[in-house]
Amino acid sequence: MPLLMNKEKVLITGVAGFIGSNLLDYLLAQTDWEIDGVDNLATGSIDNIQQALKESRFHFMEQDAFEIQSLSSYSKVFHLAALPRIQPSFELINEHIKANVLLAGHLIELMIKDQHFPRFVYSGSSAIYGTPEIIPTPETEKVDCLSPYAFQKYEVERYLELVATRYPLDYVTLRYFNPYGPRSFNPKNSFNAYSSVVGIFLNRKKEGKALLVTGDGSQQRDFIHVQDLANANYLAAVHKDKLNTSFNVGFGATKSVLELAQLISSDIEFIPIREGEAEITFADNSKAKTILSWNPSISIEDYVSEIK
């Protein structure tokens, strides 16, 4: 049953991407909001939002989010548009800076220009912790970016914090751990090798190919289902208080990449390890549980057993 509330108009950037399209479906099911979505389809897919396009409450804008001229009609903005690619961020530097830093800066400038400050829910990343010292990792862990991508995600966090000392920004940063779920793998995306490892493994299994595990597969990952991410976005958006803080969004448990592969297939090959990636991600999610009343509900084991 949709929740009863006053009609609101909200914006999702990157709406045709993996997380954006799942968030869209969640909000259409759980609210009566009018939803605008923008995506240039550089990495997203129109196929991801085909069903949502039939909804009268959803309006899709196929354009670059830099073309947005005002946010004054929105009460909430979910900023998901990004290039979430660790390895390519070392080479395609300006492309990633534009997508991951300058676009957020553009949206912040629009709020300042109009003196209208909607709740801004920013999709951050646990990549900012690098290989953390404290396990499970709280939001107070020191930042140790191992890639330009991680640095770019943290740079936006700092912009929000600093600009909020001068203007009444109303923001929440959600530091995603390792998202997976429906639509995480897009075979048409030329950078699909940097998609969720869960999606990559399931796709290779479907194609009858060996699962390629980097290094010895001992890297530990905190896998979080996209439905739980969508719920965290919603709870951050509707919280009654101005929060202006960050939250870890992870399941709060780990599994090695090799263990994940073994859940999916016995056909496994090992390839050289990739630099710039953390040895472990493991969220201390107690802050989100306490303040947002968020509780992840879908385990990686249950998901894989159902999808295989």
Image (spheres, helix red, strand yellow):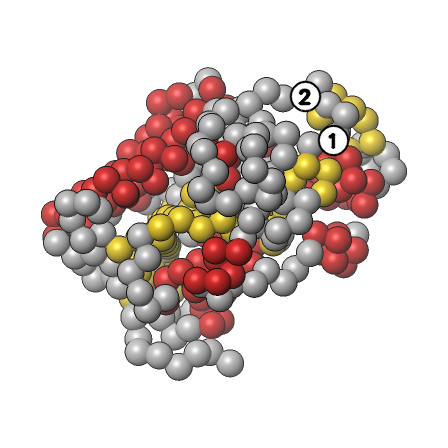
Q: Taking 64 as reference, is 70 above or below it?
A: below
- Label 1 neighbourhood size at 10 Å, few (<14), some (14-19), many (20+)? some
Q: In this view, does 223 lie to the left or right of 14?
A: right
Q: Is residue 244 left or right of residue 189?
A: left
User: As rendered, which of 263 and 126 lies closer to the eye?
Assistant: 126
Disc nearest the viewer among 1 and 2: 1
Residue positioned 31% across, 52% down in the render: 244
- Label 2 neighbourhood size at 10 Å, few (<14), some (14-19), many (20+)? few
Residue type, numbered disc 1: Ser
Q: Mark 1 points at which residue?
A: 218
Q: Where is residue 255 in the image (x, y as percent from the top left)?
A: 72, 43
- Identify the secondary structure beneath mark 1: loop
Q: Can residue 23 be seen in this view?
A: no
Estimate the spatial distance between the alpha carbons at disc 1 and disc 2, rounded to whole Å: 11 Å
Residue positioned 40% across, 21% down in the render: 93
Residue 134: quadrant of the picture = top right
Residue type, numbered disc 2: Ile
- Identify the secondary structure beneath mark 2: loop
Q: Mark 2 points at which residue?
A: 273
Residue positioned 69% across, 32% down in the render: 219
Q: Position of residue 1 (x, y in %)?
A: 51, 81
